[in-house]
Image (cartoon, rainbow, N blue to C red):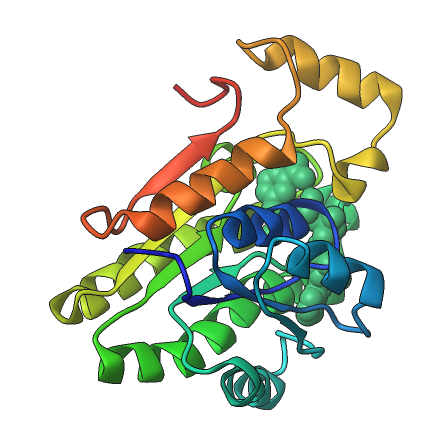
Amino acid sequence: MELQGKNAFITGSTRGIGLEIAKAFAKQGMNIVLNGRGEVSEEIIAEITAHGVNCVAVSGDISDFESAGRMINEAEEKLGKLAVLVNNAGITNDKLMLRMSSEDFEQVIKVNLTGTFNMTQHVLKKFMKQREGAIINLSSVSGLMGNVGQANYAASKAGVIGFTKTVAREAAPRGITCNAIAPGFIKTDMTDVLSDKVKEQMLQTIPLQAFGSVEAVADTAVFLAKNSYITGQVINVDGGLVM
Ligand code: NAD
């Protein structure tokens, strides 16, 4: 897909991987819809418009179905029809399985998996009509390998993979792609909270012997948005963790 002049909605793009994807798309000439649960600062909007593109903010919670629909409509009212949706917003709430309450489990599923469903269903109705669109979902290596303390998160991210492959099959006849990115350990606020001991242990398991950058994930999102003959795939950006 030619990205120049097209519109992209990136959920959870006030910081971390989402913000970097927004910047990478803007560098390609895409207009950007930034999103977070709260207000998006003028500073971040200015960072995106500095690339000579339009940028609007649409606040709201992806885990709420009505709010997801309102956000997609608001984005289109402000910018015009969307061409790319990146389901990036996600949360963790790590606890060992035996200490995890059903609320801890459901909270993470509701944002990471149900939130991805909510946003995708609303946008897919539009993509199917216009016969154009790319959906990129953020999964995780935790969804492929499992991870101690992340029964909720790993289940949500494994769910995102099954969801991605199904949407890819259902939308393919209309030329719409749906892929997932499975990052390993990427340096963001989400991973900053881990102890130095855990970080050191993780580093030893990564064949490329380094943590990943947000740019490495953002480059992959650009590649997937552009390529209209790749669908239903999961691309690992993990330093070789899952070979
Ligand atoms: P982050 O915590 O830095 O940012 C998450 C963003 O999502 C924030 O902008 C937050 O406001 C937003 N968000 C959270 N809940 C939301 C909701 N209900 N509605 C709307 N927005 C909401 O996270 P990150 O490290 O940049 O991760 C981004 C994505 O990549 C997540 O899906 C995460 O699971 C995935 N991922 C990250 C890593 C990593 O190492 N950082 C590894 C694998 C996968």
Residue 92 appears in the figure:
no
Q: Is residue 101 above or below residue 54?
A: above
Q: Position of residue 136 (x, y in %)?
A: 42, 55
Depth order, front residue of 148/75: 75
Q: Position of residue 200 (x, y in %)?
A: 77, 14
The residue at 81%/74% (across/down) is: 39
The residue at 71%/46% (across/down) is: 16
Q: Is residue 73 above or below residue 24?
A: below
Depth order, front residue of 129/167: 129
Classify residue 128 by image quadrant.
bottom left
81 vs 169, left or right, is right
46 vs 150, left or right, is right
Depth order, front residue of 191/123: 123
Quadrant assignment for the N terminus: bottom left
Depth order, front residue of 109/91: 91
How many callouts does the rendering have? 0
Q: Position of residue 194 (x, y in %)?
A: 83, 32
Q: Position of residue 243 (x, y in %)?
A: 38, 19
Residue most toward the left?
173
Classify residue 195 by image quadrant.
top right
Classify residue 68 by image quadrant.
bottom right
The residue at 62%/25% (across/down) is: 212
Q: Is residue 122 above or below residue 82?
A: below
44 vs 112, left or right, is right
Q: Is residue 154 above or below residue 240?
A: below
Residue 182 appears in the figure:
yes
The residue at 43%/45% (across/down) is: 222
